[in-house]
Image (cartoon, rainbow, N blue to C red):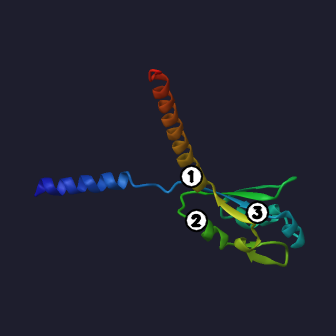
Amino acid sequence: MKKLLSLLLFCFLCNFAYSKDPGEKTFLVIFDKSELKENKSTAAFIELSLMGIFQTRSYSGNSDAAILVKIPNSTMDKCQLGEFTVRLNKNETLSLNEIAFQIIDLNESKEVYQELLASFEEKTQKIKKAERAVKSAPAP
């Protein structure tokens, strides 16, 4: 009985120690410049609404405006991020989904990219093996 109890305690501690930490999630929020101009707002002004909650960085220039949002230790997805209310200008507030052109989960995109890369490498290895087999086969 004592051994069983100590085994259960050991398993519980191992499970607790190796539990999966959700880690940091990174989102890219892209805005349409013409829509921001129409609402008399900027990505930097919208960033101020998120800055107190998350680590953010806004980008603007010749292309569309964007905000990079880093959320530490979270299982939040892009739909939940889109529900946040942000201030567009002094008088107007909207949910992020309503003003953002697109919200991209960069962690999810990275996983998809890794899967595509692995499948591509697998295909190229099969092609190389087939080419070697053809080259090594004797010609009639």
Q: Nearer the viewer, mark 3 or mark 2?
A: 2
Quadrant where the N terminus sits is: bottom left
Q: What residue is pinned by disc 3? A: 47
Marks 1 and 3 sit apart, C-alpha to C-alpha, by: 28 Å
Displayed quadrant of residue 53: bottom right
Q: Which residue is mark 1?
A: 112
Q: Residue at x 86, y 73 (%)?
A: 39
Kindly identify the residue that appears in the image at 84 percent across and 54 percent down: 63
Image side of residue 55 versus residue 66, left or right: left
Question: Which residue is the extreme one toward the front?
Answer: 140
Residue 32's disc number: none
**Amino acid type at mark 1:** Val
In the depicted structure, whether residue 54 falls above or below residue 85: above
Q: Residue at x 50, y 23 (%)?
A: 135
Residue at label 2? 77
Badge 3 or badge 2: first in the primary sequence = 3
Which residue is more in the foreground, 122 or 86? 122
The one nearer the camera, 7 or 34, is 34
Structural crowding at the residue carrying mark 2, measured as other residues with C-alpha within 10 Å and reported as few (<14), some (14–19) or many (≥20): some
Secondary structure beneath dot 1 equals helix
Q: In what element is the residue under mark 3?
A: helix
Query: Residue 129 at what x, y percent from top left?
Result: 47, 31
CA distance separating discs 3 and 2: 18 Å
User: Cβ–Cβ below 8 Å for labels 1 and 3?
Assistant: no
In the displayed structure image, the side of residue 78 where residue 95 appears, left or right: right
Above or below residue 53? Residue 118 is above
Residue at 39% over, 55% down: 19
Camera-side mark, 2 or 1: 1
- Mark 1, mark 3: which one is toward the viewer? 1
Where residue 26 appears, as percent x and y from the top left, is: 63, 55
